[in-house]
Amino acid sequence: MPTYVKSVTFDCRDALVVARFWAAALGGELDEESTSGKAFVEAPGWGGPTLWFQRVPEPRTAKLRMHFDLRAADGVPEEVKRLESLGATVKETHGDLVVMQDPEGNEFCVES
């Protein structure tokens, strides 16, 4: 039997803040027992791994070497506006690809 990715784990300052953002961004469900120390998000319907967020004492010191690329089904400008309303910020724009940051500065891309 092959191995599969069960979850993607994020180290962060406040697990609840980041988990709330990603639950809303992906239409997922935030586990009701989530705290600022640890939080769990399951994104129904996309069939991917769950997202786990854990508070760590040290700050992020460099750019993440892995990130999400989100496909904007209803158009990039509309999705960027929606994600901004959830707390994301735009870092750079490259035509139809927008580099954004979640509430703790973790980068991700939005594309068509």
Image (tube, helix red, strand yellow):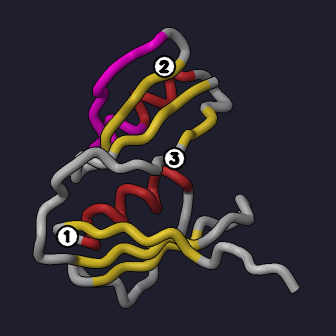
Report the magenta residues as a range. Answer: 83-94
Amino acid at pointer 1: Asp
Numbered tag placed on residue 14 in the rendering: 1
Q: Nearer the viewer, residue 69 or 17?
A: 69
Quadrant in which the N terminus is drawn? bottom right
**Whether residue 14 is situated above or below residue 66 in the rendered picture:** below
Residues marked 1 and 3 touching at CB (< 8 Å)? no
Q: Dividing the image into 4 quarters, which one contains the C terminus?
A: top right
Query: Hey, which quadrant is residue 86 in on the image?
Result: top left
Give the CA distance from mark 2 to mark 1. 28 Å
Q: Mark 3 points at which residue?
A: 68
Q: Disc 3 to disc 2, how far (Cα)?
A: 18 Å
Check disc 2 and report its element: helix, strand or loop. helix
Which x, y percent locates residue 109? 47, 34
Label whose residue precedes the other's in the sequence (2 or 1): 1
Label 1 vs label 3, nearer the camera = 3
Decide if residue 54 is on the left or right side of residue 59.
right
Residue 23: percent from left, percent from top = 46, 62
Please determine whether, in this image, residue 27 is positioned above or below residue 35: above
| Mark closer to the observer (3, 2) | 3
Q: What residue type is labelled 2?
A: Pro
How many numbered marks are there?
3
